[in-house]
Image: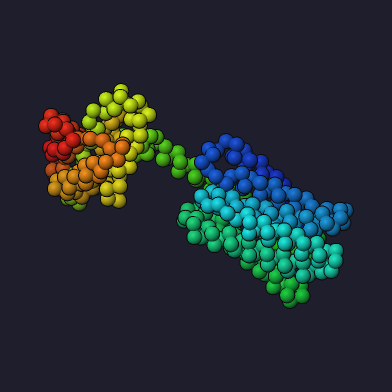
Amino acid sequence: MPLDPRSLIAMGSLMSAMMAVVLWLMRRNYPPSIRGLDYWAASPVLWLVATLLFSGRGQLSPFLTVVLANQALLLGATVYYIGSRRFLGHGGGWILWGSVAAASLLVLTWLTYVAPNYRLRVAIFALLMAVLYGAHLRFLWRHGGKGFPMRLVQVVLALHILVLVARFTSIAMGRAGSDLMEPSHFQTAYIGAYVLTVLMLSIGAVLLATDRLRTELEHLAMHDSLTQTLNRRAIMQLCHEELARARRHGRGPSIMMLDLDHFKAVNDTHGHQHGDAVLVHFTACTASVLRSGDRLGRYGGEEFLILLPDTDAAAARHAAQRIHALLQAGHPLDCQFSIGVATWQGPQDTLDAMLTRADAALYQAKDLGRNQTCSG
């Protein structure tokens, strides 16, 4: 015996209401850097409106229970798609799909009042929803990454596209039924798939936002807020890990300790805001000449530490020369700095010993007139 479609729609209404509350609370409490949450929070509200209007068939006018109900369903899916675009840093989407929604409003009105045709109306709407979900799936596949939350949303979209294609095919075969509220196994399966899709897409949005929040918190815990380089704890941890790897494989790193010359005078003369700009410029230039595997961290104040994996003394000095050359290009924020280099000396070497040698080499560079590199 098939389930009553109204019961399934009522279940969908309840789920939409619950997920709308969850997503709106997340929107209020999550940082504004996580974009798209407002759109994702609006989607279940529109789906709630759609399910409430669908459940009013037989009591309310067809314009509300057919035309506006389907429009709310379409707009909910559109808003969710726009939210995904905003979440991944993309704009656009409204002009195209807003135009599609306006056109569908006219078509549904025509097929409800002027030339009533239930089969054609359902077929067109199923095809339209499948195309919208397909565009959404294609966008996420190209830009969404490979994490579990993203894959979950992609799978849900793909499965519902299959449901919509099956619905369209059944209509073409003359098995559309006569009304959405018809108690048939097919209508039960279709409405049940819709209810499950609404729930899973909302859960997917929650997981995506939570995963992004975790990533941002991890970034804040490991990076300096001004220069966006690694903070002292993070760069030291990486140095320990690299030395452990070196003891296993026999090829060790070099480290460079960099200190900006006369930086206190820069702050005293031009102000701390200018000094901050100098630090940001310095780290951006330095990072641009490093290899992808090298790591730059703020050791403290105007002092920085660079980890150069699998690098001998000659290669480390060459890297220091590149940094010096880039920061003498005549930019208004260019600065002078001294560098002390220390290279791994074998399995008996420790990070503390390397830092001591790099620090001694740094002070040697300052004693010799600053703005140069020495090795320890």
Task: Note whether 163 is above or below 21 in the view shown.
Answer: below
Q: For the view shown, which residue lies furthest in the bottom direction?
A: 173
Quadrant in the rendering for residue 155: bottom right
Q: Nearer the viewer, residue 135 or 93?
A: 93
Q: Residue at x 16, y 32 (%)?
A: 370
Q: How many marks?
A: 0
Q: Residue at x 20, y 43 (%)?
A: 320
Task: Note whether 336 is above or below 81 in the view shown.
Answer: above
User: Would residue 1 be visible to someone looking at this image?
Assistant: no
Residue 85 in the image: state x and y as whole percent.
Answer: 55, 53
Colouring scheme, one of rainbow, by chain, secondary structure, one colour: rainbow
Where, quadrant-wise, is the N terminus in this rendering?
bottom right
Task: Note whether 152 is above or below 45 in the view shown.
Answer: below
Q: Residue at x 58, y 62 (%)?
A: 135
Q: Residue at x 14, y 33 (%)?
A: 365
Q: Nearer the viewer, residue 266 or 31?
A: 266
Could you tell whether 283 is left or right of 3 in the image?
left
Residue 11 in the image: state x and y as whole percent.
Answer: 73, 51
Could you tell whether 364 is left or right of 107 in the image?
left
Where, quadrant-wise, is the C terminus in this rendering?
top left
User: Would residue 217 be visible to someone looking at this image?
Assistant: yes
Quadrant in the rendering for residue 169: bottom right
Residue 367 in the image: state x and y as whole percent.
Answer: 13, 29
Could you tell whether 271 is left or right of 172 in the image?
left
Q: For the view shown, which residue lies furthest in the top direction?
A: 268
Residue 361 in the image: state x and y as whole percent.
Answer: 14, 34
